[in-house]
């Protein structure tokens, strides 16, 4: 599977960042691996590309994709892993003097919560609700890994993500970055 040219540069930059910079607390996770995060990154970039989002919005999604499941304690619901991942991202930004984006922090902190809560938290940020919806859709598009029937297209929030349903299915069953 080749990465579409329009997103290649961003995808490779953040995939390398994921592999070299982000450390996962649940190292033997079966469902929330770095490969899962790489596929969320891929789907987020594809949705962003379809919506022609500006670069700073794409960066919000990419950073959220690589950190979002890095602070899990188990592979189940583990509500609170979003907040812990957000705090890890904040700490990383401080330590490495890289720019911090409040939207990345909030998207991650609320990605394991109900949409209503997340949307309320993101409402005051520029394009915050849109970015939250895109991120949750990108995460959901990788639900094929959880087994047949685990992704219902009707629950996807954005038309761009709905249009990627078959692609995401192919990515999983076609064996992209699976291990
Ligand atoms: Fe998560
Ligand atoms: Fe995830």
Image (cartoon, rainbow, N blue to C red):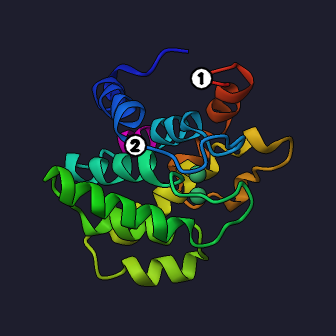
| Image x and y of residue 135, in percent | 48, 56
Residue 146 covered by magenta stretch: no
What range of the chain is rendered magenta?
Answer: 45-51
Q: Main secondary structure of the magenta part?
A: helix
Occupied quadrant, residue 81: bottom right
Q: Is residue 68 left or right of residue 139?
A: left
| Image x and y of residue 29, in percent | 67, 43
Q: Is residue 162 left or right of residue 101?
A: right
Q: Nearer the viewer, residue 57 or 27?
A: 27
- Secondary-structure class at tag 1: loop
Q: Is residue 130 visible to the viewer in this orientation of the structure?
A: no
Residue drawn at the location 71% of the way across and 65% of the way down? 77
Q: Nearer the viewer, residue 155 or 85?
A: 85
Near mark 1 (Cα within 10 A), the count class, few <14, some 14-19 or many ≥20, is few
Residue drawn at the location 60% of the way across and 42% of the way down? 27
Q: Which residue is mark 1?
A: 177
Is 21 above or below relative to 70?
above
| Image x and y of residue 63, in percent | 34, 49
> For the residues carrying marks 1 and 2, which lies nearer the camera in this image?
2
Q: Work out which quarter of the rendered image holds the N terminus and state it.
A: top right
Residue 22: mark in rendering: 2
Q: Are marks 1 and 2 in contact (CB under 8 Å)?
A: no
């Amino acid at each position: 599977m080749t990465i579409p040219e329009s997103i290649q540069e961003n995808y490779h930059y953040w995939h390398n960042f994921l592999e070299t910079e982000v450390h996962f607390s649940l190292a033997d996770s079966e469902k929330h691996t770095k490969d899962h995060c790489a596929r969320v990154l891929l789907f987020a970039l594809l949705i962003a590309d379809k919506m022609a989002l500006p670069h700073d919005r794409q960066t919000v999604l990419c950073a959220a994709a690589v950190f979002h499941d890095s602070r899990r304690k188990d592979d189940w619901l583990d509500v609170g892993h979003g907040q812990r991942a957000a705090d890890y991202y904040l700490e990383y930004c401080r330590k490495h003097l890289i720019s911090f984006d409040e939207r990345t922090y909030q998207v991650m902190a609320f990605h394991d919560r109900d949409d209503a809560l997340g949307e309320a938290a993101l409402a005051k940020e520029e394009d915050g609700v849109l970015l939250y919806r895109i991120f949750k859709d990108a995460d959901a598009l990788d639900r094929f890994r959880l087994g047949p029937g685990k992704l219902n297209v009707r629950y996807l929030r954005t038309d761009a993500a709905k249009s990627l349903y078959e692609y995401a299915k192919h990515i999983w069953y076609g064996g992209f970055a699976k291990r």
